[in-house]
Image (cartoon, rainbow, N blue to C red):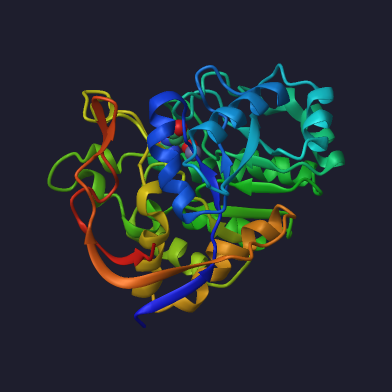
Amino acid sequence: MNKLTLIQPDDWHLHVRNGAILKTVIAHTAKQFARAIIMPNLNPPVLTVGQAMDYRSEIMQALPANSNFNPLMTLYLTNRLTEDEVKKASKSEYVHAIKLYPAGATTNSDSGVNDFKDIYPILETMEKVDLPLLIHGEVTGNDCDIFDREKVFVESSLNDIVKRFPNLRIVVEHVTTKEAVDFVLTASDKIAATITPQHLMFNRNAILAGGIRPHHYCLPIIKREHHRKALVEAAISGNPKFFLGTDSAPHLTGAKESSCGCAGCYSAYGAIELYAEVFEQAGALDKLEGFASLYGADFYQLTRNIKTITLQKQNWTVPASYQVDDKTITPLKSSEVIGWKLAS
Ligand code: NCD
Ligand code: ZN
């Protein structure tokens, strides 16, 4: 197959930051995706519907002229979130979910939740007003091995939340393990998951074998090969519980190439092309449209997109870096070749 036309995809998990980084990265997302769920882990975080609206305006202003891209906003769940704010969010046509970070789990998650029991009243309200909960599914703390943090979270906290709030729609964000895939598969149809390109493409050797590669460091950390295989199987299964969420998370090159580098891979520049390669290698290009363009919209109860995009089988070389003022962002697969290209 040399050409692939798809209903325009959406990105159901995206970090676009603000200021100069936002200006660079939003154009990359908007040229491929119709909509994206925008993560609220700014510094300071997006806590209220008012702040989400301000952030949305900033994103709209940063978009290229004539773009129809629609940013779907989220709130950051802290102990301070009130039930009134949840109700307000559920009535807003611009806010689509609330994101739960365990405190300290990842980049800008210091305001996250320490003890989930403290937020049960909020989850109950979300369940009532049918506002989806997006979960970064990892336990924190140094007593748990970093490669086990998702698995332990699924067995402990997630199981508990799902049992306690059976009607709460939950997206287990960026699943990275077979255990998380199996959990989602056996859970009710209220439970779905996003999968990133890096977790489909790489196993943990990509971070550590032959040298430390900071541009492959993201959280949850990339796991062993059998987990990668389970993720590919889930993505190409045609099961609507699994859909596209890049978790594209730009950091300046200097912040990643450091003695304590930040977590996050930058993939928005070519995300749909990266997924196309994965699906092609798995012999499942026919399953890409459901995963990338249909199932997420259905889960979020939004209309499916109508326009289409076309990908061509054509090699192109990823730039070494993208400019942000006088600094750069180093993309995933920097200076490497991708075999599919979005037709302009
Ligand atoms: C994300 C970021 O940089 O904001 N980093 C990452 O490694 N994925 C945060 C997140 O989604 O965990
Ligand atoms: Zn993320």
**What residue do we see at 47% from left, 35% from top?**
16
Residue 219 appears anywhere in the view? no
Picture coordinates of residue 214 (x, y %)?
Answer: 25, 37
Give the quarter of the image for residue 165: top right
User: Quick check: 338 left or right of 169?
Assistant: left
Relative to residue 248, is residue 311 depicted above or below? below
Going by the picture, which residue comes out furthest to the right?
A: 128
The image shows residue 23 at horizontal and vertical percentages of 42, 33
Query: 263 or 56: which is nearer to us?
Result: 56
Q: Residue at x 56, y 55 (%)?
A: 10
Q: Residue furthest left?
A: 210
Please identify the quadrant where the N terminus is shown. bottom left
- Residue found at the far front of this picture: 66
- Residue placed at 40% from the left, 54% from the top? 271
Between 189 and 71, the one lying in front of the other is 71
* Residue 237 appears left or right of 94: left
Judging depth in this view, the residue of 94 and 325 nearest the camera is 325
Q: Disc count in the image?
A: 0
**Can residue 330 be seen?**
yes
Left or right: 313 in relation to 105: left
Measuring from the top left, give residue 263's x and y in whole percent.
36, 33
Q: In which quarter of the image is residue 295?
A: bottom right
Residue 309 position in % (x across, y down): 48, 66
Q: Residue 73's image quarter?
A: top right
The residue lying furthest to the bottom in this view is 1
- Vertical comparison of 81 with 209: above or below: above
The quarter of the image holding the C terminus is: bottom left
Query: Residue at 66% of width from left, 62% of height from top?
Result: 186
